Image (spheres, grey):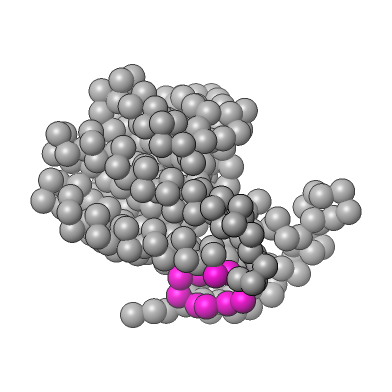
Amino acid sequence: LAGYDLSGQVAVLTGAGSGIGKASALTLAAAGAIIVGGDIDEAAAQATADEIRDSGGIASAVRTDVTSRAQVDALIDGAVASHGRIDIMGNIAGIPHNKMVAEVTDEEFERILAINMKSVFYGCQGAIRHMIPQGSGNIINISSGAIDTPAPTLACYAMTKAAVAMLTKTLATEVGPEGIRVNAVAPGVIHTNFSRHNYPDAEGNEDPERVEKYKKRFGSMAPLRRVGEAQDVADTLLFLCSTGASFMTGQILRPNGGAAMPW
C-alpha cells in the first residue's frame, strides 16, 4: 500500500539489536526506510544492519549507551550528518524490572530511571532539534501495558513507562504546531528476550517448556488467547509511520490482544 511506503525516510531507532527494536528496524526497512540503529550491544546492532543490507536495504549500526545524553545525541546527529535529515525517531531501548518496592536499591532505581525514562527524554530532545527546523517528524516511544494494571514487583518499571506516556502526550502538544507527531506504543505481554528473562534453564538459556507455560498463562488473560510477538509491536510502529496515522498525535496505542481496555 502506498501509505506504508517509507522510501527515503530516515529512521533512528534505539534498542535495534534485539526484540522489538530489531523487529521494528527490519519492518521499517522492508517498507523502504533508511535505518540507523543504536544499541549498547554493537555486535547485535550490526547484525540487524547486516540483515537489512543483505535484503537490499540501507542501514548502519552505532554502539549507543542510551543512559548517556552525549551518545544519544551522537546517534541522532550522526544520522542527520549522513543522510541529511531525521524523519522517524523510535525510542525503543528498555529493561525489565521485577522487585518489591521495599527491596529496590538506589543503584537499581537509578539504572531503570536512566534506561527506561531519561533515555526517552534524551531521544525526544535530540530528535526535535532537527525536526523543528525541518517542519516535520515522527517520534514513537515505547511505553507498556504495565501503566494500566498495577501489579506487585512492577512499581519501578510501571512508573518509568507511565512517565514515557505522559512525556509523549505533553510533547505532542508542544511540537504539533511544528508539524511533528509524537505517539507511544504500550504493548501487553510480548514474547521476546525482554520478557522471557524470568524463564531460563539451569544454564541461563531459554527453557522451552517454561516459556510455553508462560505463554499459556499470560495468553489466557487476553481475549485473543495468545501473548504478543515482537512483530505485533513492530507492525504498530509501522502503522504510526504510515499516512494512515497522519492525523494521530499524543496517542498511546496498545497492542495487547485485548488484555487491557482502558478508556
Image: 240 above or below 259: above
User: Image point 75% across, 65% down: which residue?
Assistant: 212
Q: Quadrant of the C terminus?
A: bottom left
Kindly report the secondary structure that dominates the magenta region of the rendered protein.
Answer: loop
Most distant residue in the top direction: 82
Residue 228: within the magenta? Answer: no
Q: Which residue ends up furthest to the front in the rendered image?
A: 106
Direction left: furthest residue: 177
> Does residue 155 appear left or right of residue 243 in this picture?
right
Looking at the image, which residue is at 54% across and 53% down? 110
Q: Give the image location of residue 226, x and y in percent.
A: 60, 70
**Residue 219: quadrant of the picture:** bottom right
Question: Relative to the observer, which residue lies in front, 63 or 209?
Answer: 63
Marker count (numbered): 0
State the residue at coordinates (76%, 69%): 213
Give residue 70's position: percent from left, percent from top. 41, 31
In depth, the one of 61 and 150 nearer the eye is 150
Q: In the visual, does 205 lie left or right of 76?
A: right
Look at the image and give the residue range highlighted in magenta.
146-155
What is the x, y in percent for residue 88?
Answer: 32, 40
Foreground residue, 135 or 218?
A: 135
Relative to 53, residue 124 above or below: below
**Residue at horizontal 42%, vertical 79%?**
261
Residue 204 appears in the figure: yes
| Residue 134 lies in quadrant | top left
| 4 shown above or below 161 | above
Give x and y (percent) for residue 182.
27, 53
Q: Is residue 84 left or right of residue 116?
A: left
Residue 228 in view, yes or no: no
